[in-house]
Image: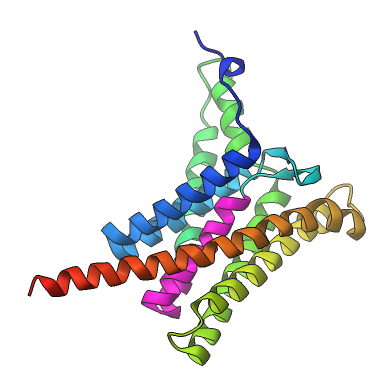
Amino acid sequence: MISMSDIPTLSPSILLLAEYVFSGIFILTARRFFGLHGLYIYSAVGVIAANLVVLKTTYFPYYDSPLALGTVVFSSLFLCSDIINEYYGKAAAVKGIWVGFFAYFVLSAFIFLNIGYVSADGGQAQEAMRHLFLPAPAIFISSLVAYFFGQYTDVFLYHVIHKKTGERLLWMRSLVSTFLAMLIDNAVFSILAWHVFALNPLSFTEIFWTYIWGVSILRFIISFGNIGMMYLSKFLSRRKKAHVQSLF
């Protein structure tokens, strides 16, 4: 039998790049085949996945302190919101935020109820479910509050810049709205989780250098990557429209 220790590990940088590419492919595929509903599905799955993997930390070559995973998944939610905002409008993007929240709430409710059953396998599955799906209340609350602040900031800024620039400067509205929103999301989560709700609060200096600064560098890089994804979505939309017009 193959154990977890037998599974080869890859470079965190390679995994990070692969995770980003796959998230972009999933979003573009969701819109291509399922339209707005597909993007809502991605938002729901993304919120759940991000709040699970954020419980794990690892080291990256560019930073000395361990960083929480989930940065790419969380960042892809902003890309998803921007695409919804670009093609379906602000109201649809705001609805997407609530879809993600509702999905996470429903999952948590079901898991909480099922943890109430007596475990028949000695408690292994029980403990795994408890650890993965019911993290500390401070993490849960901080994550949801940060999600709302970040997502609403992204939707609002993208909409305002879009109204001012029209179809021009796609790169500007994508970069500005995404990076500022992700910065707010990260800062709100870090301050709430590690200071406001923490049993042993960390100083703001430690929170900044350990949790905010390192993740913000990564999110800034991802913000530039999202610009490419936005232009790719435009290219695919034009190709699809040209193909449809050629049929008539």
Which residue sits furthest top?
1
Q: Is residue 178 left or right of residue 79?
A: right
Q: Which residues are the magenta region?
A: 71-95
Residue at 51 percent across and 12 percent down: it is 2
Please tell me which residue lies in front, 53 or 209.
209
Judge whether residue 74 is colored magenta: yes
Q: Is residue 59 left or right of residue 45?
A: right
The answer to whether residue 101 is seen in the rendering is yes
Judge whether residue 17 is colored magenta: no
Please tell me which residue lies in front, 227 or 88.
227
Residue at 78 percent across and 58 percent down: it is 212
The answer to whether residue 98 is seen in the rendering is no
Magenta region, main secondary structure: helix
Q: Is residue 187 left or right of residue 140?
A: right
> For residue 14, which quarter of the picture?
top right
**184 above or below 54?**
below
Q: Quadrant of the C terminus?
A: bottom left
Q: Position of residue 187 (x, y in %)?
A: 75, 63
Q: Position of residue 55 (x, y in %)?
A: 66, 41
**4 above or below 222?**
above
Q: Is residue 113 left or right of residue 150?
A: left
Residue at 53 percent across and 45 percent down: it is 19
